[in-house]
Amino acid sequence: MDLHCKSREDDLGGVLLQVFEEFQWSFRPNLFGGTLFYCHVNWGDGRLYWFDFYVQRRDIKRCRSVCRWSVDVHGPCSYNEHEGGYDKCYHWNYVNIIRRGLLGNGTMEEREKRGLTE
């Protein structure tokens, strides 16, 4: 899995992860509540997937010190520290990169331009 994560201020670069490998980063949330980190994922199937892995308003209470996610081809799942398991799963956002059309729901940059992100 090719993974590339970034925020508006920080580009964490791309990494190639094997099954069960981990990728970590640390940051301090914005005082005004606007911190957003998203990652693009390429599974090699002709689509570019992405998900907003940290949205401050959504995640500040859920993961105060550590946000842990598990991902597979179906989507990312967040870890619940209180319950001790992955309890909330989401679908991937995606773009068809073979045709270079927006058959999914747009790129992250396009969503930012349209004001669809936090």
Image: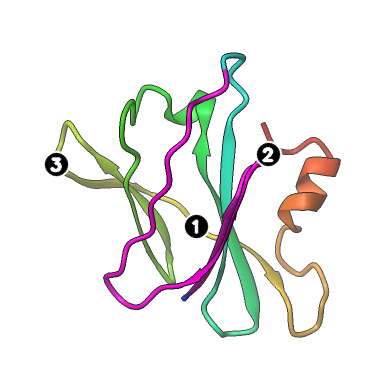
- Residues in magenta, as a range: 2-30
Neighbor class of circle 3 (other Cα within 10 Å; few <14, some 14-19, many 20+) is few
Q: Which residue in the rendered view is the most extreme toward the left?
A: 84
Magenta segment main secondary structure = loop
Q: Residue at x 70, y 37 (%)?
A: 117
The image position of residue 66, as x and y in percent, is: 31, 36
Q: Which amino acid is tagged 3?
A: Gly
Q: Earlier in the sequence, mark 3 or mark 2?
A: 2
Q: Is residue 61 above or below residue 12?
A: above
Q: Is residue 50 magenta?
A: no
Q: Secondary structure at mark 2?
A: loop
Q: Secondary structure at mark 1?
A: loop
Between the C-alphas of marks 1 and 2, the distance is 25 Å
Q: Which mark is residue 77?
A: none
Lateral position of residue 27 relative to residue 33, left or right: left
Mark 1–mark 2 CB contact (< 8 Å): no
Lateral position of residue 22 relative to residue 28, left or right: left
The residue carrying mark 1 is: 91
Q: Which mark is residue 9?
A: 2
The quarter of the picture where the C terminus appears is top right
Q: Residue at x 52, y 78 (%)?
A: 43
Between the C-alphas of marks 1 and 3, the distance is 22 Å
Q: Earlier in the sequence, mark 1 or mark 2?
A: 2
Q: Secondary structure at mark 3?
A: loop
Q: Which amino acid is tagged 1?
A: His
Tag in front: 3 or 2: 2
Between the C-alphas of marks 3 and 2, the distance is 32 Å
The residue carrying mark 3 is: 84
